[in-house]
Amino acid sequence: MIILKKIYTTLIIIFRGFLWLFFGGNVRKFSKIWSAYKYGGLRLCWYRAIEKFSEVNIRYDHKSNQLSRSQSDFLAKQFKKKPLISIVTPVYKVETKWLEKCIDSVIGQYYENWELILVDDASESENIKQVMKDRASRDQRVKIFFREQNSGIAGATNFGIAQIKGDYIGFLDHDDELTLDALTWIIWAINKNPEGLWFYSDEDKVSEKDGYYGPHFKPDFSKECILSNMFTCHFSVYSSEIIRKVNGIRLGFDGAQDHDLALRISEIVPQHKVVHIPRVLYHWRAIPGSAAMFTEEKPKAPASGRKAVEDALERRKLKGIVTSNKICPTLYQIEFQPNNYPDVTIIIPTRNSLALLEKCIESIRNHTKYPNFKILVIDNQSDDKKFLEYIRDEQSRSALDVIKYDKPFNHSDMNNIAVNSVKSELIVFMNNDIEIISDNWLEQLVATVNSDESVACAGCLLVYENNTVQHGGIVLGIHGLAGHSHQYLYSDSPGYNCRLLAFQEMSVVTAALMIIKKTVFEKIGGFSIQKYPTVLNDVDLCLRFRKAGYRCLYNPMVKAYHHESRTRPISDTEHKYRARFKEDYGNILAYDPFYNPNLSLNHNTFYSLRDFPVSEQIPELKK
């Protein structure tokens, strides 16, 4: 059955790709294919086809799981707060049919306490002006302003901001649409999170023929992820006070003005006051001239975005070189550099396995220029003569240190003992089957874990020898426990909405290659020796970090081969640890904050959906 499903899915992807390529005509699509081919060959082209034409797009129904009018009315009666929401829309040289749909999507909102600020930025179109006047005459909540001189999207947006009266402000592009329940969800979230200052939703794309596709089901907020990618984007609603505090939109960031705004706000709003609503509330119109169709439609955007990210790094006192990804130019990849070079100990447990260990240590030496590190090998009852001779020789040259662990294999216990034996504040856990392939890998991990006091650990991108993904962070709930994000995808593919190659917070990262702060590790008691001696100990560790108020980061700029599962066989008794994990963490497995409840737990690749009815999020609607 699994094989048949794979064949069916492959045929669907090929068929839909054929229709997209040869019908509807847009020369840009061929340039996108050529760009992917130059960067990653046929393999990357195929993975890009999977992203575009996979099950998430085949199954997607934009009307499913929306609030009905009656549900919205029911909720409205429960709301204690019913604030005025101001929506600002700059208008400039847009087809009137799209502008009409845009305005009508606001007028039709189930929640009624709103105002729409339409700012004509000297469009010089009587038809546009007539549409605006017509809608304003029908509904007094639509307020229109006409600028005599064009001031660009930043100037027009700031003018609109100056006119608002609401406690909250949202931004809507002149050719996009809100779902009819959009503001109901926003007000529900405001009432649910009275301290919230920034609310954002999921979004999708809508074609010229009103076909809805490409849903972007987003993670909860991470101030790291916003550095790499403007993932919050649509629909974002901010406290008006916060918008005024940062002085609105900055000039000089055309095409990335919203990203710059989000970066600046993320630096003054605590993470717990940024609220994600995992519902598609915004339809992004994919037409010529819109970045929803191709990034190249906004040629200034990548450069503006890089400048915004560079400014953010400077404000945050972080060092790093910012580049645009070759496939997704508005995905910004940051090569971090540490502000200082504290001592680091690299801990590598092993039992024999000379060939693996030699390759591991050689790769460290070949790719590490970091000045203050040492290697500590944990020898777990090795008896291979060549291995023991190698270790003695390395020790005699002071090339590494060794401690003996003369007990049956217990990954948690041996690493705890090793951590306790060293003085350095920073520790790298490394499996003996890791092969470093990134220069400056240790500098980047040090910079990442020291980027914020709240960070306890940081992981990286691990790949198989065929350059497919082994680990891109860990998602809770996958296959009932936890699974590696984007596993088996081509490692140069940006992944689902650029998630694979984005710097970001995640619930869990693997200890196959992980840097930690020793003080935090010791504070929570290290690895769980009795509960998780061999498997799931890194997942448990990260979840205990999070429970203690710390965070785990994923940095894909650090890359290594993971020659996985070559050291020891998987024990038949390990199923009991999996059962224990479900007992300990079963209440959170279905809702990883950095995944999305609309995405399937049966796949590692983000490209399948699960049902997420509104009553699951709002229990009152079950009545």
Image (cartoon, rainbow, N blue to C red):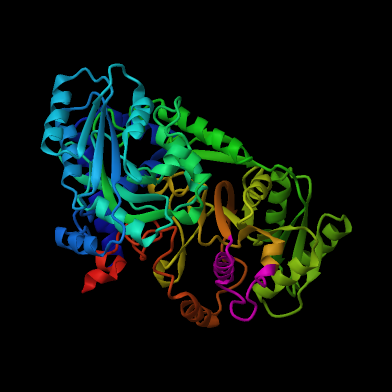
Q: Position of residue 187 (x, y in %)?
A: 30, 55
Which percent across, then down, holds residue 574? 53, 79
Q: Nearer the viewer, residue 174 or 168?
A: 168
Quadrant where the N terminus sits is bottom left
| Looking at the image, residue 376 lies above or below residue 319 | below
- In this rendering, position of residue 99 left or right of residue 33: left
Q: Is residue 470 visible?
A: no
Q: Is residue 477 above or below residue 321?
A: below
In x, y percent, where is residue 347? Answer: 72, 61
The residue shown at (27%, 57%) is 7
* Nearest the eye: 295 or 380: 295
Residue 357 visible somewhere in the drawing: yes
Q: Is residue 510 left or right of residue 579?
A: right
Picture layout, residue 480 above or below residue 563: below
Q: Magenta residues, as a range?
A: 523-550
Q: Is residue 455 above or below residue 284?
A: below
Q: Residue at x 15, y 34 (%)?
A: 136
Q: Nearer the viewer, residue 528 or 48?
A: 528
* Residue depicted at x 69% and y 75%: 413
Q: Is residue 548 magenta?
A: yes
**Quick one: quadrant of the C terminus?**
bottom left
